Amino acid sequence: MSNDDIKAAWYFHNGTKHPNGYLLSRTHRFNPAQKPRLFKTYTDLKPIPLPLDVTQREMSALEAISNPAATTEDEQIPDFGSIARILHFSAGITKRFRYPEPYGEIPFRAAACTGALYHIELYLICGDLPDLDAGVYHYDSQNSGLIQLREGDYVHHLTQASGMEDAISHAPAIIAYTHISWRNACKYQARAYRHAFWDSGTILSHTLALANAERLRAKVVIGFVDEAVSELLGLDEEKELPLVLLSLGYGPEPSVDSGAALDALDLAVEPIAQRETIFPAIREMHTASSLWDRSKVKQWRKARVHVARTKPENGLVASQPLGAEQAPTQAVEKVILRRGSSRKFSHDPISFNQLSTLLVHALRPIPFDVTSADNGPLTQAYIVVNNVKGLASGKYAYHHDHEGFERLEAGVFRAQAGKLALDQNLGADASINIYFLTGLRSALEDLGNRGYRFAQLEASISAGRIYLGAYALGLGATGLTFYDDEVTKFFSPHAAEKSVMFLVAVGAPAGGKH
């Protein structure tokens, strides 16, 4: 791609950096008393209750985040119960806490979200399933139900929109993830578009894990005609943007055109706020990274990112993951119900075995519809080790292909870890800070502006797996924001020319094991 083709992504990325990105106002203030409604509500439609069976499946959380479901061409048709479980443990309400005013009660969801503002919406598109008729549905997390927006089988519409992607064509069910901009931008301004992929990726880490537990194939599909998906879901693209699709299950016969007409949806939706500010930078970045017809989708999907792999120069400390007999076996659903975002860490160490187990499981390949030229990841994990029993404190690069740690510099960097994490003590208090950095220039040159979505999603799905793996190991975790260029500088020269996509801090929870 030429520089002209990718200048929108660079403009947005550089303009939303901390500190003082030119697309961010230093005078902007968030008023919690005026936060938007956290639920999308269709005023004239009633939800179909989800048949939620909370019986745990046999798969442990560590297995669920690392082992892909069978990819054979055997039929895998989810029933309504499986769909209900996947939706609930991806984005359903799992706990409620009441805080002093102006915050009030916060209904926390299954997956973490920046600012607990829950700006990601889920939609189900399916053919006829056991106990659920074909249709297009909105997931109503507030009432734990499905709102039917269209009757009939519209999978073929998404097959067309995805450029005849095989996983979509053969999917009995598809989940679409969208971003309601103002619900997050009210606090984070234009940077909310980064958060759209951070938070949808974190949710996707749950969806993929639950699909594995249900023994269903799943694939993350980034390539599609954005306008066609918006039209199907009835989105007002000034306010809500399509982000990503996920195929669920496998039907031996591909979808066929059912002949269902795609009439415009005119459904009454309650406003989420009295006033919604439109951030032009979000809309412009989304438009610049959109695909406008099926031929463009097919062309985009054929591209491969040529990532320059950094070979270890300082030797490697081999991972020492826990063996099967020591690894925790708690079911993924139970871990999700316990998961939170740690607000305080003790300075107690975690073990090298725990760190190794976490990375070996969480950084397994993600099933995307587009890959790098060597099928390796776009992102690399860089780690500030503050207190790990069995591994010296310092800066490290993790090499997933060798399952080993390359020490870049020895030393105690607690103060710097807190500084890099936007001056948050959590970064200093955590046992480790895991940064996901990527060669963004390569991603954009090979995939265009849409490569920005890919880079953000890959990092956030991996970070979401880190979240779940940490809680499975009895640890705590939280996502943090950061000073972009200072992070790159801190890990350079190894990380020179790389860009930060995500930061997750992990440590021993204050007050004991989670």
Image: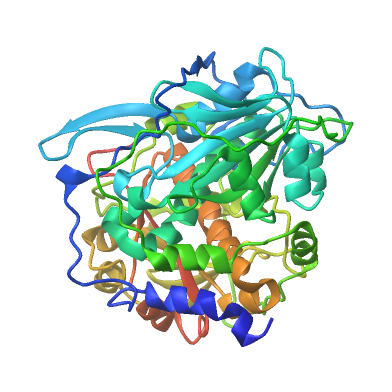
Figure quadrant of residue 421: bottom left
Say if residue 76 shows up in the picture.
yes
From the viewer's perspective, is residue 48 above or below residue 352? above
Figure quadrant of residue 509: top left
Residue at left 27%, top 43%? 273
Say if residue 404 shows up in the picture.
no
Front-most of 12 and 210?
12
Front-most of 504 and 476?
504
Looking at the picture, how far across and down is residue 198, in whole percent? 46, 55
From the viewer's perspective, is residue 180 above or below residue 499? above
Q: Is residue 514 left or right of residue 86?
A: left
Q: Is residue 336 left or right of residue 307?
A: left
| Image coloring type | rainbow
Residue at left 68%, top 71%? 447
Front-most of 197 and 398?
197
Looking at the picture, how far across and down is residue 318, in whole percent? 59, 63
Residue at left 50%, top 35%? 90
Looking at the picture, how far across and down is residue 187, in whole percent? 27, 56
Front-most of 300 and 441?
300
Looking at the picture, how far across and down is residue 297, in whole percent? 75, 60
